[in-house]
Structure formats: C-alpha cells, structure tokens
C-alpha cells in the first residue's frame, strides 16, 4: 500500500457517514479497530488534537489539594492529593 494516509482517511470518512460505531464498521470491513483509531488520531487536524481545554492550577484550601482539568468534550476531572509532576506529564502525554 503506497498511500496509507489516503487509505485510512477514506475509511474514516466512510465510517462517519455510515452511522455505525467504529467497532461495527471495523468488523464489517475486516480492519483492526486499534489501527483505525491510531489513524483517526494521526490524521485529525492539528487544532483538534487538544488534550486539555483548561487546566486550573492546583489549589490548596484548608489542607485539601486538587487540580481541576476540563477536556474539550466538556468532561471534567478533579485530581486530589499529591500531584506528582511525572504523573501529570504521563496524563498529558508529554
């Protein structure tokens, strides 16, 4: 296969138009869901590759320490306790 990005972009477009879940589409087309997801992430436009929308600094109120993370989807996450820098880098994919 000479042009893998074009091949996978066609599958991504077809899956989105089909209305099927990724798993159902991949099963029907005999392709790996993991590979499909890899190419979907890789081919996503740069501006859509935002991991976090907003990360608020850790706050400490009366001995309580937490970080608040808001994702582009609207989901929010609170991390409590000691916030190890290595863990946060891993979480952010850095």
Image (cartoon, rainbow, N blue to C red):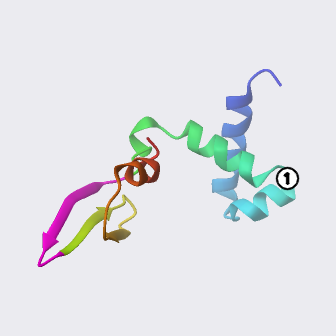
Quarter of the rendering containing residue 81: bottom left
Asked if residue 44 is positioned above or below residue 61 in the image, the reply reads above
The answer to whether residue 90 of the structure is visible from this angle is: yes
- Say few, some or many: other residues with alpha carbon within 10 Å of mark 1 (under 14 / 14 to 19 / 20 or more): few
**SS class of the residue under badge 1?**
helix
Quarter of the rendering containing residue 69: bottom left
The answer to whether residue 13 of the structure is visible from this angle is: no
Q: Nearer the viewer, residue 1 or 88?
A: 88
Q: Quick one: quadrant of the C terminus?
A: top left
Residue matched to label 1 = 29
Please, which residue is most extreme toward the top here? 2
Residue 86 lies in the magenta-colored region:
no
Instruction: Specify whether 93 is left or right of 4.
Output: left
Where's residue 29, x and y in %?
Answer: 85, 52
Asked if residue 68 is positioned above or below residue 31 in the image, the reply reads below
Where's residue 75, x and y in %?
Answer: 38, 69
Where's residue 24, x and y in %?
Answer: 77, 64
Q: Which residue is drawn at 26% across and 65% down?
A: 67
Main SS type for the magenta part? Answer: strand
Q: Nearer the viewer, residue 30 or 68?
A: 68
Please, which residue is most extreme toward the bottom here? 62
Where's residue 66, x and y in %?
Answer: 25, 69
Instruction: Specify whether 66 is left or right of 38.
Output: left
Q: Quick one: quadrant of the N terminus?
A: top right
Q: Residue at x 75, y 54 (%)?
A: 33
Please state the extent of the stretch shown in magenta in the rendering.
52-63
Q: Nearer the viewer, residue 94 or 22?
A: 94
């Amino acid at each position: 296969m000479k042009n893998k990005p074009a091949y996978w972009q066609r599958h991504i477009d077809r899956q989105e138009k089909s209305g099927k879940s990724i798993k159902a589409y991949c099963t029907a087309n005999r392709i790996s869901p993991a590979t499909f997801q890899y190419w979907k992430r890789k081919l996503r436009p740069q501006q859509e590759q935002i991991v976090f929308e907003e990360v608020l600094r850790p706050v400490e109120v009366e001995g309580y320490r937490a970080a608040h993370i808001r994702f582009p989807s609207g989901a929010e996450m609170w991390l409590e306790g000691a916030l190890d820098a290595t863990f946060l880098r891993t979480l952010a994919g850095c």
